[in-house]
Image: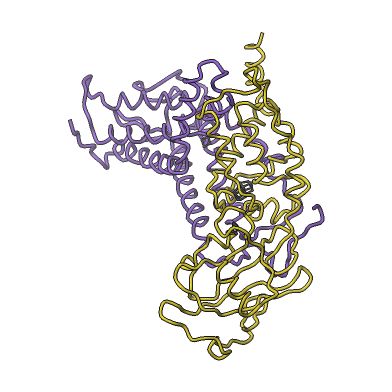
Chain colours: A yellow, B purple
Amino acid sequence: MSTVDATGGVAAKSSPAAEGHPVATPGQRERSFRIWRGTAEKGEFVEYTTEVSEGMVVLDAVHQIQAEQAGDLAVRWNCKAGKCGSCSAEINGKPRLMCMTRLSEVPDDQPATIAPMRAFPLVRDLVTDVSWNYEVNRRIPAFQPRKPDFEDGTWRMHQFEVDRPQEMRKCIECFLCQDVCHVLRSHGKYDGFIGPAFLVRAAAYELHPLDTADRATYLKDEGGIGYCNITKCCTEVCPEDITITDNAIIPLKERVVDRYYDPIGKLVQLIKRK
Amino acid sequence: MASSSPPLEVLPSTRLGATQRIDHWWLAPFAVAVGLALCGGYATWAIFQGQNYFAEPYLSPFYSPCLSAECPAEVRLLGITWWPFSPAILIMGAILGFRGTCYYYRKAYYRAYFMDPPACAVEEHRGSRYRGETAFPWILQNLHRYFLYLSIPILAFLWYDTLLAFRFDGGFGIGVGSVVLLTNVVLLSGYLFGCHSLRHLVGGRTDCYSCSRFPEARHGAWRISSIFNRHHMFWAWTSLVFVCLTDLYVRLVAMGVLSDPRLI
Ligand code: SF4
Ligand code: SF4
Ligand code: FES
Ligand code: FES
């Protein structure tokens, strides 16, 4: 184990063999990782070297380091299958799920940097406090189904009508999209912008064939959808491949345009209604 | 979490371009900046030039519809006499407005020219005054659908020009220019059909198709637009580059540099 300062300079280095670790068997080899250790007040990148084998993901390596060299390393995880959204981190600067990033995808010519998500307050090491997201979620105008179609309290809808909201329902709440979104990450608009994850949530309700709620005003004012400049980083990082910008945010932006920025359209609607 | 600030020590610098990414993240914005500058520069020159835009039976797409009195008789419409400049300038606003407020190009130039952000997880200028598209000037991007309305008739004229590009001496024929014009109009159509605003207006704004009038037509139109929309960036680039090449081809034929071989 050796320490590295926050700008990347290696302070010291030693091999696992020298530290008494077993020498790599065939199929195994050593790889180095720079992992953020510490809190928001004080911390640094620490370099660890460990033996890895084919098929391992970044989370496996982190667990191995935790088991062998750094028992107090804080890391959040749960399913190891890309479904719980707990293990979000920044691997070589890219927001990703540690359990879904194979080591073979990470260049091995230099130590891989593993850092916590930058858009949320750091608890310790790789763990951030994402509770702001749950508060935002509570404020989104809820799903409001129309009156049931049948006396037994059920509705009828077609699959092709629910395809759109179902895409949004794939969200695993990993908050990688929130982390990468420059409106939050760089401009800190936590008070005025709900972020891509909750625009996805709003779209899941808003595009639903049974929903009757009107969220245009909420999206424009509280939701701050105008802050999004559709630069698509959220779509690039989503591990569930939700087409966040094209299928959630832009359709919602267009609904806001319908309401607030299209006087001719409003006039046509008015005439049609009469 | 109004007070939450990111753990700055994790990435010590917040200067423009700072990142822990180790890939060539700057390549894409650089290529976009160069590509847009080249196409934009050529288009501006071609639009203001006002000459060599017609080589019978081909009309440069930058000049269609040709509305001023100085347009060649074969393609003249309206014949506006009070306009002393290049006839392309008369329609330039609609085209520029359509591309300039397009959701794809917005992403492209916000990243490439305004570095807002330059690439994902790469630092940008951190002014406290970020307003995004909530305030002037970018709030005007919301007018995109109006530029779409203006562009639809222009696309119709381009299809008409393309039909004329298959007529030689009163009969049917095919020249290399006919194929060039046809390719151009197909690419432009692919670009327009995938427009996000069009996708919304033809059916995307409907939630419950089965409760609406003409459910199949609405959902069908939305689906077709979605097919083009999925590759909107492809259509945006190919149509942009090809419209410049089409103008160049017509120009070179008009100047006598190329001979426009007849295929049929
Ligand atoms: S597209 Fe909008 S929401 Fe998504 S990352 Fe970019 S600015 Fe944020
Ligand atoms: S939309 Fe995608 S990136 Fe965002 S929280 Fe959901 S799964 Fe994660
Ligand atoms: S551990 Fe559940 S998504 Fe990675
Ligand atoms: S969104 Fe690109 S043309 Fe409308």
Query: Does residue A135 appear left or right of residue B196 in this picture?
Result: right
Query: Does residue B50 appear left or right of residue B207 in this picture?
Result: left
Q: Tell me where residue A109 appears, x and y as whole percent.
A: 48, 75
Relative to B13, say whether A205 is above or below: above
Q: Residue furthest left?
A: B264
Q: Tell me where residue B32 appears, x and y as whole percent.
A: 49, 52
Relative to B251, say whether A214 is above or below: above
Residue at image location 56% in from the left, 89% down from the top:
A20
In-front residue for pair A34/B46: A34
- Quarter containing the N terminus of chain A: bottom right
In-front residue for pair B247/B153: B153
Q: Residue furthest top?
A: A274
In-front residue for pair B123/B80: B123
Q: Tell me where residue A15 appears, x and y as whole percent.
A: 55, 87
Relative to B135, say whether A112 is above or below: below
Relative to B120, say whether B61 is above or below: above
Residue B118 found in image quarter: bottom right
Residue at image location 37% in from the left, 26% down from the top:
B159
* Number of marks in the rendered image: 0
Q: Residue furthest front?
A: A152
In-front residue for pair A58/B51: A58
Q: Tell me where residue A270 appears, x and y as whole percent.
A: 67, 14
Q: Residue furthest bottom?
A: A18
- Quarter containing the C terminus of chain A: top right
